[in-house]
Amino acid sequence: LKRSGIYPCTGIYFFKSADQQELYAKYVENVYQNLTELGNGKLGKTFLAKNVQTGKIVVKKQVSWSAARVYERLKDTETLYLPDIYEICAVKDGCVIIEEYISGETLESLLELKGKLPEEEAVSYFVQILKGAQVMHEKGIVHRDLTPSNILISSDRVAKIIDFGIARNRREEGNQDTHILGTVGYASPEQFGFLQTDNRADIYALGILLNKMLTGEMPNEHLTENRKLRKIVEKCTQIDPKQRYGSVIEILDEIGNGGVI
């Protein structure tokens, strides 16, 4: 590749010429061979792909410029609970993300199969999700769509947060979000345009997730009967963001060492 003048992407590049954009698009197309389509979103398709130079299986997907900025912050992050981001390549209509392929199933699929999870298993996954969220929040990222479909349980039983398509880099200024985004039932009230979202929007969704894993139902349908866990769910899902936990670290402290209650 270096001999031909094509270099792997190591960040986001805003090219001035169409020729440079085309060069990187060809790089992605030539090096990462599509194997099968995994999804088709508004911005483009997601593929299972293979790096023809190394043989590594990866996920290749096109995202918007704003989403690419989020992925840029996640690149080179070392944690078990988020996928590794290998490359971010500018193309004509946005960016192509090359990320780790994780063998496993979504939490949504697992809950559809089991209905609910045993308490110890649910709390174990919840602690792992919290640790992934902690890394995101420390990098100034608000996911805004923490749902069972965006939690992947790997084949070695590790919970990983995926799909940062509507995540945002947190801004200190501003009174409210520009767009209403998120999954109904998991999206916090402020995501409907009343306030700017911050980490507490994810904390709201985390409370819903915990209850869903424990009971198979939403908190307004049926709350977990474990008093300590119910308290966590209720505090996470307060309508007023100021009444929720201020950080996922506070939730981890409440659960206790190892996450076993």
Image: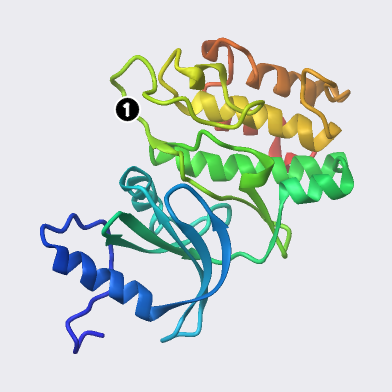
Q: Quadrant of the N terminus?
A: bottom left
Q: Secondary structure at mark 1?
A: loop
* 242 and 251: which is toward the camera: 242
* 257 and 209: which is toward the camera: 209
Residue in the picture at 76% in, 40% down: 123
Q: Quadrant of the C terminus?
A: top right
Return the residue found at the far bottom: 3
Q: Which residue is mark 1?
A: 171
Q: Is residue 228 left or right of residue 95?
A: right
Q: Residue 167 location in percent, x, y? A: 45, 39
Q: Count all numbered tags in the image, as a single digit.
A: 1
Q: Is residue 138 left or right of residue 128?
A: left
Residue in the picture at 53% in, 15% down: 241
Give the image quarter of residue 25: bottom left
Residue in the picture at 58% in, 21% down: 245
Vertical comparison of 49 with 215: above or below: below
Q: Residue 185 location in percent, x, y? A: 67, 26
The amino acid type, in three-letter code, at marker 1 is Arg
Q: Residues within 10 Å of mark 1 (few under 14, many from 20)?
A: few
Vertical comparison of 50 with 183: above or below: below
The image's colour scheme reads rainbow
Residue in the picture at 15% in, 69% down: 19
Q: Residue 33 location in percent, x, y? A: 46, 78
Q: Is residue 3 left or right of residue 198?
A: left
Residue 261 seen in this snapshot: no
Return the residue found at the far left: 16
